[in-house]
Image (cartoon, rainbow, N blue to C red):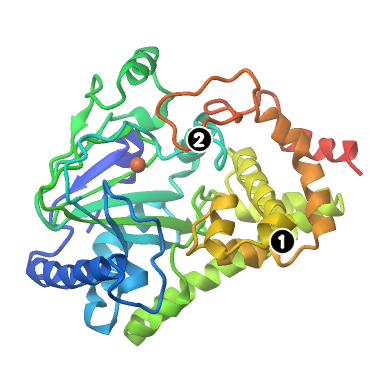
Amino acid sequence: MQVNPQQLLDDGFIILPQVVPPEQLDSLRATYETIVERQHRIWAGELDWDVPVAMDYKPKQPRVVLSAVVDAATADTVDFSLHDHTLGVSRQLMQAPDAAPVGMFLMSNPATDHGPDPWHRDVVPDRLAPLRGLQADMLANAPGYVQWNIPLYDDDVLWVVPGSHRRANTAEEERLLTENARAPLPGGVQVRLKAGDGVVYSNLILHWPSDYSTKLRRTIHLGYRSFGGALYPYDTHFYWDLGFTKHLSPASRAQFERFAQLGAQERDRIETLFRAMLAKDAATFRETLALLHPGETGRMVAVVLLSKKAAQIRALKRPEIASLPRNDRAVAVGDQRVSLYLLEDLAGRFSPEETELLWQRFAPLDARLQDATAHPTPGFQGNESRYVSNEMPANFGVDDFITGWDESA
Ligand SMILES: [Fe+2]
């Protein structure tokens, strides 16, 4: 399947017919139903499964984490995330040599009506870089992350504001979202998908889950990140680990092993970069940053994203967090239970003292990312944040960041 990457950059989303090959629709519906039933039995406490339920059960949008409940008889659900129409298209759109599924989910309907959710962009200011930085990075280098909804039954829950992935909220949007974030926005478009069609989009776009009703919903929800593209993606989690791949065919398993290797290679680079910072070795820092983010434009966004990782591994070292059970540890550092092992792998490479020193190197940047007078911006996710939601620090580039190390020990 051929797509035009420019269309995603222009509009923020692309609707594609027959992402599920028609001859596969019935069988995928059947295997997904098996998975949904299994998940409901796990949620009801009637069934133990080898992987704990990965994410909190959301009553309004019950979500199945595929890797947590798949078995050999339902492995076609995972194989579909490796299909040319999903993985292949994602790789084209991200213009990268490699792409990997970050998360493989199924969104299903709730048992009772929950109505509309708020309009939002999938941006948590505490965890990512300011929106305008993420957007500029994407527009200069191609997206490093794309997200999909692929319904197995007709689905028009999702709305988007075309083009809003390229800009901040307008003043009118701010006003309307503040009044009522659960109503149509000017220019908003309902994404009407027939069974088997798909929409692939930048999750920086203003989007709206317009109705969590009891109407049958079985919508495959996939996220992909790039590897080897021009930028460092803002979503580097895998919401899976290799354990689940024992259920897959050898060919599919080999693909996931390769994705895990690419992730491990990236963490090695991050370690090298952090160690260069500890040693105030600017040359190695620049070299490694250019490996993580080859595009010249937007490197500072990568530095901001890496500062968030440094903050997370620092938090993991705090005794009161380190001693928590895994799920609570993940929540405390803003991660997910299934992906925490990746962060802990990185954290395990540094002593508590190194982690503190690393944070001192990031502190001048972190201070510039905060604004004590900031008021909550509508359309963002997460709790009220002291971090600026829209604008990157002005006049503060990689050179300034490196110069700032001299202010620390
Ligand atoms: Fe969202």
Residue 187 rendering spot, x and y as whole percentages: 23, 22
Locate residue 266 relative to residue 181 in the image: left or right: right
Residue drawn at (29%, 71%) of the image: 78
Quick one: 48 or 196, which is closer to the camera? 48
Q: Quadrant of residue 363?
A: top right
Residue 186 rendering spot, x and y as whole percentages: 24, 19
Specify the amino acid type for callout 1: Glu
Decide which of tag 1 and tag 2 comes sooner along the chain.
Answer: 1
Q: Is residue 373 visible?
A: yes
Q: Is residue 277 visible?
A: no
Mark nearest the camera among 1 and 2 is: 2
Identify residue for label 2: 383
Q: Quadrant of the N terminus?
A: bottom left
Quick one: 382 or 132, which is closer to the camera? 382
Identify residue for label 1: 271
Can you say whether 385 is above or below 111 in the image? above
Q: Quadrant of residue 76?
A: bottom left
Specify the amino acid type for callout 2: Asn
Q: Quadrant of the C terminus?
A: top right
Residue drawn at (55%, 57%) of the image: 328
Locate residue 335 relative to residue 199 in the image: left or right: right
* Ligand 1 rendered quadrant: top left
Quick one: 161 or 349, which is closer to the camera? 349
Element at label 1: helix
Residue 388 rendering spot, x and y as whole percentages: 58, 27
Please rate how many residues cluster around mark 2, counting C-alpha atoms within 10 Å: few if below 14, some from 14 to 19, many from 20: few
Residue 367 rendering spot, x and y as whole percentages: 72, 31
Can you say whether 157 is above or below 258 in the image? above
Residue drawn at (59%, 69%) of the image: 264
